[in-house]
Image (cartoon, grey):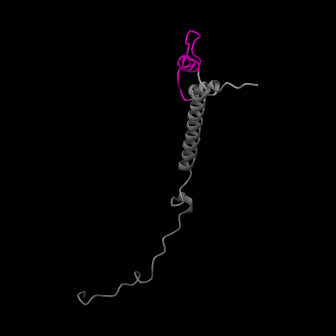
């Protein structure tokens, strides 16, 4: 069974927001074009699609991590009360005070 990698590129372009007509003309040129895609062209297109998919997945993972609470951020319910030190509770009188 022969797999046509152009279909994968076509789907990736549509999912990334490209117009259907543009994507189809880009990946499925009409029969009047005499230039057929060579093996190196197909390989480079495949590598490009894999790279775009990798970057999209990585960006989605980053977005999920950014939505989670950071280790330095605390939810309001987990706030600890401020403990005052005893040194500041009873200040000494100054010699200038009456």
**Front-most of residues 48 and 69:** 48
Question: Is residue 29 located in the magenta-colored stretch of the structure?
Answer: yes
Which range of residues does the magenta coloring cover?
A: 16-36
Q: Where does residue 5 sit, x and y in percent of width and height?
A: 64, 27
74 up-or-down from 81: above or below: above
Q: Where does residue 74 sit, x and y in percent of width and height?
A: 53, 59
Q: Quadrant of the C terminus?
A: bottom left
Q: Residue at x 58, y 21 (%)?
A: 27
Q: Residue at x 58, y 29 (%)?
A: 40
Question: Is residue 51 located in the magenta-colored stretch of the structure?
Answer: no
Q: Quadrant of the N terminus?
A: top right
**Front-most of residues 82 and 3:** 3
Q: Residue furthest left?
A: 96
Q: Where does residue 88 sit, x and y in percent of width and height?
A: 40, 81
Q: What is the magenta segment's predominant secondary structure?
A: loop
**Residue 86 falls in image quadrant:** bottom left
The mark total stands at 0
Q: Residue furthest right?
A: 1
Determine whether, in the image, residue 96 is placed left or right of residue 74. left
């Amino acid at each position: 069974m022969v797999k046509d990698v152009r279909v994968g590129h076509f789907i990736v372009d549509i999912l990334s927001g490209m117009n259907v007509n543009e994507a189809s003309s880009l990946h499925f040129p009409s029969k009047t074009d005499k230039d057929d895609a060579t093996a190196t062209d197909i390989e480079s297109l495949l590598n490009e699609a894999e790279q775009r998919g990798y970057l999209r997945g990585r960006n989605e993972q980053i977005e999920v991590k950014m939505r989670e609470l950071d280790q330095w951020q605390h939810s309001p319910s987990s706030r600890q009360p401020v403990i005052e030190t005893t040194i500041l509770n009873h200040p000494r009188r100054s010699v200038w005070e009456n």
